[in-house]
Image (tube, rainbow, N blue to C red):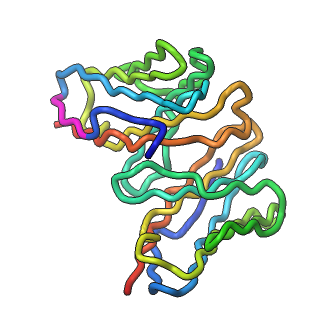
């Protein structure tokens, strides 16, 4: 039973749509992460929040917009995406505070297809 | 640049032993993680090495040589459920996690 849940598990959207991905962690952690995982490529870190403050934004296009209303919830708002944005989007959490050697716990991911 | 290399795919037989290698070139080193990811599921933490040597956890062991920029994950007494991708990731000098592309392990009966 994972302590990190993500919804929806699968999403198909057109390039003009607006949708949101949701992540919730039940582990009492204070740091949350969004990753993009494309086939046969390394995980790409997109955003990091530590105690609800964004600490990393790895040159992610503005069509991806994160929101972290509290330490347990993380959203990724999507609009005017491109077909190359199709990928598995993974959320992770870690104890936080000191991110240096935290072990990250992942959710099952949202499989996104952009038509 | 920073780079993590691991084989794309490996095949092994049920009951056997397999070693998955990971070599890295990063700006600094603050530890190396191994994660397991079954198809369509979340990556799950397997091990963390920061000092040289072998760490054993049941059927799984992880080895690190910092001087060689090298690690391996050793899986013993392979079971069909071990079929998964195994991800190697290194914490660099800025405590950023640098990920490999993963090794897909196929277990045959």
Residue drawn 45% across the image and 21% down it: A73
Asked whether A3 or A87 is in front, the reply is A3
Can residue A84 be seen in the rendering of this structure? no
Residue drawn 52% across the image and 52% down it: B44
Q: Magenta residues: mostly which secondary structure?
A: strand
Residue drawn 25% across the image and 22% down it: A19
Residue drawn 18% across the image and 31% down it: A13
Can residue A71 be seen in the rendering of this structure? yes
Q: Where residue B95 appears, x then y in whole percent? A: 72, 38
The number of numbered discs placed on residues in the rendered structure image is: 0
Q: Is residue B17 above or below residue A71?
A: below
Which residue appears farthest toward the top when viewing the image? A69
Q: Quadrant of residue A111?
A: top left
Asked whether A61 or A109 is in front, the reply is A109
Q: Where residue A43 appears, x then y in whole percent? A: 49, 46
Residues shaded magenta:
A10-14
Q: Is residue B32 left or right of residue B46?
A: right
Q: Is residue A43 above or below residue B39?
A: above
Q: Quadrant of residue A57?
A: top right
Q: Where residue A90 appears, x then y in whole percent? A: 42, 39
Q: Is residue A2 magenta?
A: no
Q: Where residue B42 appears, x then y in whole percent? A: 43, 48
Q: Is residue B68 above or below residue A83?
A: below
Image quarter of the C terminus of chain B:
bottom left
């Amino acid at each position: 039973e994972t302590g990190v849940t993500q919804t929806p598990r699968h999403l198909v959207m057109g390039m003009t749509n607006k949708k949101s991905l949701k992540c919730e962690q039940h582990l009492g952690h204070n740091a949350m992460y969004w990753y993009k995982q494309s086939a046969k490529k390394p995980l790409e870190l997109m955003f990091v929040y530590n105690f609800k403050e964004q600490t990393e934004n790895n040159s992610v296009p503005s069509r991806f917009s994160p929101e972290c209303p509290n330490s347990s919830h993380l959203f990724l708002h999507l609009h005017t995406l491109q077909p190359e944005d199709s990928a598995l989007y993974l959320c992770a959490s870690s104890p936080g505070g000191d991110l240096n050697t935290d072990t990250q716990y992942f959710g099952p991911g949202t499989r996104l297809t952009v038509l | 640049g920073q780079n993590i290399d691991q084989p794309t795919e490996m095949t092994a037989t049920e009951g056997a032993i397999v070693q998955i290698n990971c070599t890295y070139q990063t700006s600094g080193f603050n530890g190396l993680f191994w994660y397991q990811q079954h198809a369509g599921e979340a990556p799950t933490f397997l091990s963390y090495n920061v000092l040289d040597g072998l760490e054993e956890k049941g059927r799984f062991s992880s080895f690190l040589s910092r001087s060689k920029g090298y690690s391996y994950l050793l899986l013993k007494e392979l079971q069909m459920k071990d079929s998964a991708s195994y991800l190697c990731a290194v914490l660099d000098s800025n405590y950023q996690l640098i990920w490999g592309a993963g090794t897909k392990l196929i277990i045959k009966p």
